[in-house]
């Protein structure tokens, strides 16, 4: 199951990565992410980690942030990596003692083989990861004044850079003059780094070493910049080739393969998404989505579009090609498969994410908003799986942030009934991520006075009471955070709805006050979340204003009577008794 795009932590963590889910873990919707993109190789030369001389290297990706080239099984990915990367055999053991004096020598990376003939993209991404890792490690050893390691790693870095340049030249198209110049500058800096680090090995004067360290830091920084420029140019050329192939192809198999490659590139982070958008990727993919002969490829193309639109350039390109109108046509056309409409909903969720400020200026979206909202409510009602419902509800949740008129539309479309009925259907609503979307919609709709009567009529107060007790199943950080958001938004919804005395009395009858007090007084019940605490205090005070008799004197004196900040401090410092 993937997580939704955008509304922060509403449909948060970005679309896919889904990891609206970087797609490695639950995927997407806007945030975005999470994250939905990780450290990008293209930024290696910028913002580098503070070192003597005022240089920086902290933007170099960590090994754990390595590029994921294809969506494949994790074991298969590991097997592929073994062909490329091996560990130095430096931990030979005799009587449980390592022979090597370098405790980190076991982490040395050696390139065992090429990335396959005729595959420049894999070569660039895998070689790029190796070089970025070496740059980061050299920076670490330089900060520790470990000159022997700095020099040996500099020599190895030079070998990796030379191999990348020669191998890419062998498999790529004719090199441009600009690339040739940057390749030359890169190799010159590599040689300079090796030479200066070798001289440092022969210097014992600390004052001289300190000045040479600043020189090494500057050389390393410049080298990182040249590497980033070269990698960006090379990747841009490969993206251009993919986009041209999609644009010119009328063969379904060729288009499917090329679109899959493009989608894989979007998983490498925002910098690559920007390149794809700038080089016409959005235009080419919408061209696919407007051809009936490619209908079976619509889900794949739309999923790729959702990934690209996590960056501003992607959203701008979408608006230029009337992409919103195309999405509306797909969503309102019942002849399209549910999978196609679900992926279209994912794109809508991404481009309306409240965490992407540049999406708030989508003027074309307002023109089609009524059609899109109507289609999304219908998709929620007819969804055959939890993922389809998640994507449709995430899109609706983000739209309620995008424009206040959407809440009025949802009220007219009886969306509250659709959402509350879905909550009792485990096939559609089975995770806290989905309930997060539902309670987000209810919270935003609850600002409307007419919403209260619909909530009471559909037994919505009882549902909200249940959401206050949301608990994670797996205990993963993402799921725990989703449960916190559900509790917080449920309390916010209850506080807003309790302006209506009928809702307040119903909440008191269902013992909502007892649950709110428990959440305030017991940090473990709210996972020690301050956001949940503030929302629960606000809801409790609203209910106490209507039905003060539902509170004990101690609760009133500690949770209602003082200033909100005083009650917050009291509860946030409260220690639980386990006696």
Image (cartoon, rainbow, N blue to C red):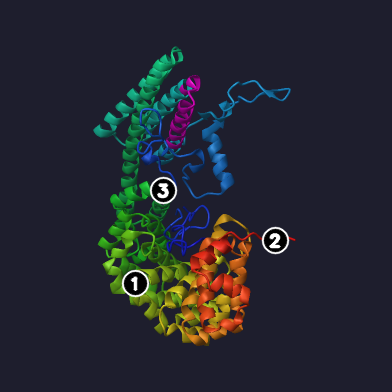
- First-in-chain label (3 vs 1): 3
Above or below 234: residue 187: above
Quadrant of the image occupied by residue 446: bottom left
Above or below 203: residue 9: below
Residue 276 pos. (x, y %)? 33, 50
Q: What residue did someone put label 1 on?
A: 403
Of residues 554 and 522, the one drawn nearer to the viewer in this rendering: 554
Quadrant of the image occupied by residue 577: bottom right
> In the image, which is nearer the foreground, mark 3 or mark 2?
2
- Say few, some or many: other residues with alpha carbon within 10 Å of mark 3 (under 14 / 14 to 19 / 20 or more): many
Query: So how many labels did they put on this image?
Result: 3
Residue 483 pos. (x, y %)? 56, 64
In the drawing, what numbered circle is on residue 161?
none
Q: Does 146 appear in magenta? A: yes
Examine the rendering and report whether any part of residue 428 can be seen: no
Q: What residue did someone put label 2 on?
A: 577
In the drawing, what numbered circle is on residue 269?
3
- First-in-chain label (3 vs 2): 3
Of residues 468 and 436, the one drawn nearer to the viewer in this rendering: 468
Cα distance between the residues tagged 3 and 2 = 46 Å
Question: Residue sitting at 56 percent across and 49 percent down?
Answer: 73
- Decide if residue 140 is on the left or right side of residue 169: right
Part of the protein shown in magenta: 128-150
Cα distance between the residues tagged 2 and 1 = 46 Å
Residue 445 pos. (x, y %)? 43, 77
Q: Secondary structure at mark 1?
A: loop
Q: Secondary structure at mark 2?
A: loop
- Decide if residue 92 is on the left or right side of residue 23: right
Of residues 431 and 110, the one drawn nearer to the viewer in this rendering: 431
- Say few, some or many: other residues with alpha carbon within 10 Å of mark 2 (under 14 / 14 to 19 / 20 or more): few
């Amino acid at each position: 199951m993937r997580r939704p795009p955008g509304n922060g932590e509403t449909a948060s963590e970005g679309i896919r990565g889904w990891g609206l889910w970087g797609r490695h873990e639950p995927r997407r919707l806007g945030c975005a992410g999470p994250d939905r993109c990780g450290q990008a190789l293209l930024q290696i030369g910028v913002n580098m980690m503070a070192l003597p001389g005022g240089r920086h290297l902290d933007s170099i990706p960590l090994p754990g942030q390595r590029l994921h080239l294809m969506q494949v099984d994790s074991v298969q990915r590991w097997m592929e990596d073994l062909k490329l990367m091996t560990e130095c055999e430096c931990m030979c053991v005799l009587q449980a003692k390592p022979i090597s004096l370098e405790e980190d020598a076991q982490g040395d990376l050696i390139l065992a083989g090429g990335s396959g003939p005729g595959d420049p993209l894999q070569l660039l991404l895998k070689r790029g990861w190796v070089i970025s890792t070496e740059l980061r490690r050299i920076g670490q050893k330089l900060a520790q004044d470990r000159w022997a390691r700095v020099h040996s790693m500099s020599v190895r870095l030079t070998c990796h850079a030379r191999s990348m340049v020669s191998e890419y030249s062998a498999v790529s198209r004719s090199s441009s003059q600009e690339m040739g110049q940057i390749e030359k500058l890169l190799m010159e800096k590599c040689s300079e780094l090796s030479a200066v680090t070798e001289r440092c090995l022969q210097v014992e004067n600390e004052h001289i070493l300190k000045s040479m360290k600043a020189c090494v830091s500057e050389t390393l920084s410049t080298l990182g910049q040249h590497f980033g420029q070269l990698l960006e140019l090379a990747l841009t050329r490969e993206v251009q080739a993919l986009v041209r192939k999609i644009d010119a192809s009328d063969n379904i198999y060729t288009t499917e393969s090329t679109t899959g490659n493009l989608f894989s590139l979007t998983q490498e982070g925002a910098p690559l998404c920007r390149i794809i958008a700038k080089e016409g990727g959005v235009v080419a993919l919408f061209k696919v989505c407007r051809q009936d002969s490619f209908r079976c490829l619509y889900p794949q193309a739309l999923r790729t579009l959702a990934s690209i639109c996590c960056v501003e350039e992607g959203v701008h390109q979408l608006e230029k090609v009337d992409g919103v109108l195309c999405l509306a046509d797909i969503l309102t056309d019942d002849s399209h498969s549910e999978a196609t409409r679900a992926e279209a909903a994912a794109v809508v969720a991404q481009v309306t994410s409240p965490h992407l400020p540049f999406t708030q200026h989508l003027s074309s979206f307002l023109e089609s908003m009524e059609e899109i909202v109507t289609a999304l409510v219908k998709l929620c009602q007819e969804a055959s799986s939890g993922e389809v419902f998640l994507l449709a509800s995430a899109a609706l949740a983000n739209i309620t942030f995008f424009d206040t008129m959407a809440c009025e539309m949802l009220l007219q479309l009886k969306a509250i009934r659709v959402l509350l009925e879905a909550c009792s259907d485990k096939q559609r609503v089975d995770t806290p991520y989905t309930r997060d979307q539902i309670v987000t919609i209810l919270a935003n709709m609850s600002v409307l006075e007419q919403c209260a009567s619909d909530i009471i009529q559909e037994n919505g107060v009882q549902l909200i009471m249940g959401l206050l007790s949301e608990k994670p199943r797996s205990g993963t950080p993402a799921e725990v955070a989703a449960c916190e958001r559900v509790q917080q938004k449920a309390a916010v919804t209850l506080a807003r709805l309790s302006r209506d005395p009928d809702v307040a009395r119903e909440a008191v009858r269902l013992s909502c006050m007892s649950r709110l007090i428990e959440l305030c007084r017991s940090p473990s019940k709210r996972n020690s979340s301050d956001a949940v605490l503030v929302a629960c205090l606000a809801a409790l005070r609203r209910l106490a204003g209507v039905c003060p008799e539902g509170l004990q004197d101690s609760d009133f004196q500690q949770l209602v009577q003082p200033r909100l900040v005083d009650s917050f401090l009291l509860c946030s410092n409260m220690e639980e008794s386990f006696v």
